[in-house]
Image (spheres, rainbow, N blue to C red):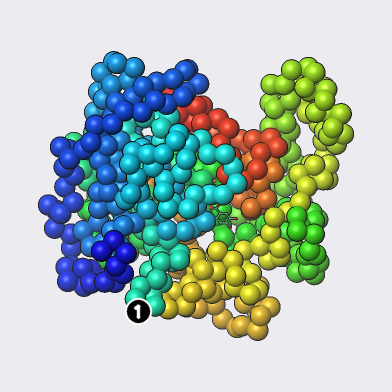
Amino acid sequence: AAAALPALGLGARQRASAAPEDLRFDPKNYDELTTTITTDEGDRTVVYHFYRAVTYVADPVDAKYQCLNVSVPVRINGNPVDATRAPVLLANAVGGYMPSSVADATGIGGGGPAGAPPPEAGGPSGGQRVSNPELALAAGYVVVEPGARGRTLVAADGTYYGVAPAAIVDLKAAVRYVRYNHGRIPGDVERIVTSGTSAGGALSALLGATGDSGPYRRHLDEIGAADASDAVFASGDWCPITDLEHADMAYEWNWGGNPLSSGELVDRTVSRELAAAFTGYQASLGLHDEHGRITAHNYDEHLLRTYLRPAASAYLGRLSEADRADYLAEHPRIRYSGGQAEFGWQEYLEHAGARKKSAPAFDAFDISSPENNLFGAGTTEARHFTQYSLRHTGGDHLAGDLPATLRLMNPMPFLAEANPGRARHWWVRVGTEDTDTALTIVGNLAAQLRQLGDDVDAAMYWDAGHATNEDAGAFIRWIGQVTG
Ligand code: DHB
């Protein structure tokens, strides 16, 4: 029965709005589990209540994905814990914009060994996975792990029912469910902090940016989402793969001069045209830092000053003198004196090495990228979503629904218009060797948030690749500070 294909949207047609009793969380329906979690402060043995596979919408399209798990700490190292007023970490495990299910998890974080992604979550590939959910539980927080539909799901009639905007609609429905169940789910539902990595980082950023925004309502109504706010308090975003319709330009601006790891050649004309187009896009954002406008012409300086040199300085500062001497001998492009790393943009690019993706990086000419599938629709598996790639392949107009769908997947326009329902506390991280997308994606997200006056803790991990999380303990402490 679990493998049966869903009756697409049947419930939505039968019912105009969610019957409230459908969405009431049952506080008594848990298993009591015990796990030992290694934290920066040593091992903690946590007894917790585990609520599994709770459907979070009244009219699920596919309940295998539209369900969530809740973990509530009750004893830590033998001491009773009252999580009634604890912050709530809403940790998605989406990777690659793939379907993400928590339905078969046997405990927090999937129930496997600490750090393993939940079964079938896909999980962002590449980095070593530190478990934010487990560390949050060990800190006494309530942890909600929502599943969500993803791009490859297809119904019996051939309809792709997990393409955009399904994943963000589902995650917003999960937030609404938690808020709706205020007093039934332990924890302070006014202090929901989201987290995610890569595609999951993009979705976490979207949750932070789009709280209570109008354009999602129709989609939320369709699946019978709870009648509650979907605003969140804070957003933790690791290497968000976002601003997808501008990511090809940004990628060529950033990595255009770097060779492909496969050794294949990148089309120089395509790369140059896309990089040139980045200038206009960047100008249109109207972003600045303390030195003035951040443009395509000075973005290298912005990144060096704000992220890259501080990341290298912190990294080198942590090494022993002997290890530092070895590192500097091995990496002659990186210099170090007086506690400060020094290098230029070209030196950084050469140090970072190969790019991961061809050109265009996201809207592939042969519509073979994950994002082409993400912007599929109906029975169409994959589509172009930029004018550049569409025209390059002989197309003319983007499909009529695309501008609206792209907007639902991009936090930047919601931040540009200062959405009042947005999170006001942001944690943003990416590795300096993460070439899954441009560093300007994080740079622009953080700059836009700072411009709004929001509280932003943004930093890069030196020499770290895709989907790395090197300061999970600091993130957990940050949650305590911003929610305290
Ligand atoms: C992910 C990585 C990508 O390179 C991408 O284009 C989309 C998603 C990920 O790891 O989630």
Q: Amino acid at mark 1?
A: Asp
Left or right: residue 142 versus residue 210 is left
Describe the element under mark 1 as helix, strand or loop.
Answer: loop
Q: Note whether residue 283 is visible.
A: no
Q: Specify whether tag 1 is near ligand 1 (CB below 8 Å).
A: no
Q: Quadrant of the N terminus?
A: bottom left
Q: Is residue 25 above or below residue 260?
A: above
Number of numbered callouts drawn: 1
Task: Please tell me in which quadrant of the rendered image residue 351 appears.
Answer: top right
Image location (x, y in percent) of residue 18: 18, 59
For ligand 1, the image quadrant comes to bottom right
Q: Residue 166: image x %, image y %? A: 39, 62
Which is more toward the observer, 27 or 313?
27
- Quarter of the image containing the C terminus? top left
Q: Is residue 405 visible?
A: yes
Quadrant in which residue 170 is drawn: bottom left
Identify the residue at horizontal 12%, vertical 52% (top origin): 21
344 relative to 362, above or below: above
Say whether residue 424 is left or right of residue 448: left
Q: Pick whichever, 469 or 36, lies toward us.
A: 36
Q: Position of residue 470 (x, y in %)?
A: 58, 32
Q: Which residue is at 68% across, 41% downward? A: 432
- Say which residue label 1 marks: 157
| Residue 46 relative to residue 82: left or right | right
Residue visible at 21% across and 58% down in the picture? 58
Residue 181 in the image: state x and y as whole percent. 21, 43
Q: Image height check: is 228 above or below 166?
A: above
- Quadrant housing residue 457: top right
